[in-house]
């Protein structure tokens, strides 16, 4: 069974934070968080730990990479499941 992952944006929404609220909790500008939500492939372990703790989601359940890659993989999986 594949592990279930979600984007940082989905984790933030599920935790009930707006982008500005989450950024304030992390002590960063909301545009920085927006950039991370688009591409989190180069985040350091401390940042990953902080995001995981804030959103109350295990690190292995968060997708770290380009959001477009995540969406592409979901579409491929959906197409494969239709066969």
Image (cartoon, helix red, strand yellow):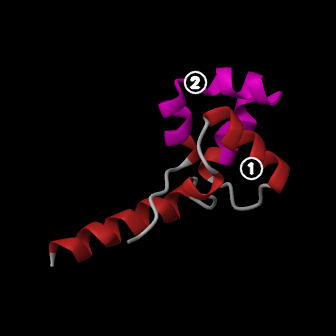
Task: Give whichever of discs 1 and 2 has the lower sequence position.
Answer: 2
| Quadrant of image for the C terminus | bottom left
Q: Residue 69 versus residue 53: which sits nearer the camera?
A: 53
Residue 78, placed above or below residue 56: below
Quadrant including the N terminus = bottom left
- Please tell me whether residue 29 is drawn above or below residue 80 in the rendered image: above
- Determine whether 54 is above or below 48 in the image: above
Q: Residue at x 75, y 38 (%)?
A: 32
Residue 63 position within the rendered picture, expressed as x and y whole percent measured from the top left: 57, 57
Name the residue beneath numbered marker 1: 48
Cα–Cα gap, marks 1 and 2:
17 Å
**Residue 35 percent coordinates (x, y):** 68, 45
Task: Tell me which secondary structure the magenta stretch mostly adopts.
Answer: helix
Q: Is residue 25 magenta?
A: yes
User: According to the image, label 2 marks what residue?
Assistant: 17
Q: Which residues are magenta?
A: 10-36
């Amino acid at each position: 069974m594949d592990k279930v992952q979600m984007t940082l944006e989905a984790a933030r929404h599920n935790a009930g934070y707006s982008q500005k609220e989450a950024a304030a909790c992390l002590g960063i500008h909301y545009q920085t968080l927006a950039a991370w939500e688009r591409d989190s492939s180069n985040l350091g372990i401390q940042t990953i730990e902080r995001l995981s703790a804030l959103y109350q989601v295990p690190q292995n359940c968060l997708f770290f990479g380009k959001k477009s890659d995540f969406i592409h993989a979901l579409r491929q999986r959906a197409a494969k499941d239709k066969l």
